Amino acid sequence: MDDVRNRDMKDLINTLFFLLNQQNIHLHQIAIEEKRFRKSVMNFATTHKKVEHVCHIRDFQLLLAENARQIQIHHEMLQKYLDLNEDLKDTTLYQQAGEVLKETLSTLK
């Protein structure tokens, strides 16, 4: 029978992978919206169009900040989970969790 702790660890790992993917999406959205804003400035677009782009950029930045906060929370949760379940060190999930923690740590800096 499958250990419940492995299932819980896998859920935490998948959540962190999802959040990292979302972070990349938000960064891409910000870059695209900044590109659209620069293009509208170069084409002398109307002011409301420029403001709309700036509002979108700000919205995506807020989403990115919330995503970073969620990554921090789940990073700490997974770290605590690994500390409490050190007897699972020999499993591949435990090592994968360590790699995910390193990856999230690099994105939080």
Image (tube, rainbow, N blue to C red):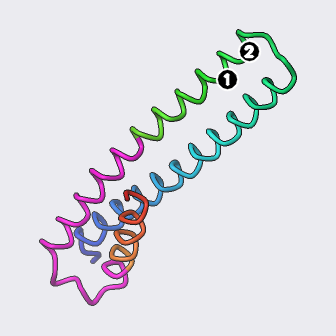
What amino acid is at disc 1? His
Instruction: Say whether residue 30 is left or right of residue 40.
Output: left
Split into 4 quadrants, where in the image is the C terminus?
Answer: bottom left
Instruction: Give the camera-side residue of 101 and 45.
Output: 45
Viewer-nearest residue: 14 or 109: 109
Q: Residue 74, how many percent across, how many down?
A: 30, 54
Q: Main secondary structure of the magenta part?
A: helix
Is mark 1 in CB contact (under 8 Å) with mark 2?
yes
| Above or below 3: residue 39 | above
Count neighbours of disc 1 (C-alpha within 10 A) and say few if under 14, some if 14 to 19, many if 20 or more. Answer: many
Residue wearing tag 2: 49
Q: What stretch is highlighted in magenta?
A: 67-95
> Residue at image x 64%, y 40%?
29
Q: Say if the magenta span includes residue 57.
A: no
User: Which amino acid, mark 2?
Assistant: Lys
Q: What element carries label 1?
A: helix
Q: Position of residue 57 (x, y in %)?
A: 59, 30
Displayed quadrant of residue 107: bottom left
Q: Is residue 29 above or below residue 48?
A: below
Q: On the image, numbered disc 1 is attached to which residue?
A: 53
